[in-house]
Image (cartoon, rainbow, N blue to C red):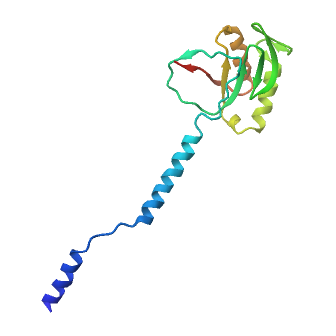
Amino acid sequence: MFDQSMGRRSRQANKVPQLNLNSMMDMLSIILVFLLANISADEKDFVLAADLTLPLSTSKLGFIKAVQVKLTTKELMVEDQFVAKVSGDKIVGTRIEGKKIVQLYNMLQRYRSFSKEAAKDIVILQADREFPFELLDKVLRTAAMAGYPNFRLAIQKE
């Protein structure tokens, strides 16, 4: 009887263990879906205005999705919606109260009420590198008054 049980154990010890490939495939597909979801939301939502020359920078910060304000040589826009004309270094065709551009303020308030990106209090400013600081200051102060106190400047990597 003792010899019989030893024979069974030695037969079981000689068996090669097998991997369960179903569990491994499940883990692999979960990891793949996670990576695709994170990589696909990276830089595809950033559309650069045509008549714009961005400043150069060596910044390593990544792109975040936020409300885009574009200050081109011809117009001021929020998410590709026209706000006001730009002539030289001045915004024309809209009322300006102190440092507040009224039409931009109203557009950002409207956008804040219905957009997912508006939940963040960040705006991305695309502005030509030749604009004076005073003009950028008016746009950024107006955005802050409308509920977007934080900003990032769109740049071109060197």
In percent of width and height, residue 55 lies at: 60, 15
* 28 versus 56 height, above or below: below
Q: In the picture, which quadrant includes the N terminus?
A: bottom left
Relative to 61, 146 lies left or right: right
Residue drawn where x is 24% and y is 78% of the image: 12
Count of all numbered marks drawn on residues in the image: 0
Residue drawn where x is 70% and y is 34% of the image: 118
* 148 versus 89 height, above or below: below
Relative to 99, 128 lies left or right: left
In front: 128, or 94? 128
Residue drawn where x is 25% and y is 74% of the image: 15
Relative to 21, 121 lies left or right: right
Relative to 134, 29 lies left or right: left
Residue drawn where x is 57% and y is 20% of the image: 156
In percent of width and height, residue 134 lies at: 70, 8
In percent of width and height, residue 151 lies at: 63, 24
* Residue 10 picture quarter: bottom left
Q: Which residue is outermost to the left?
A: 3
* Residue 98 picture quarter: top right
Q: Which residue is outermost to the bottom?
A: 1
* Residue 141 picture quarter: top right
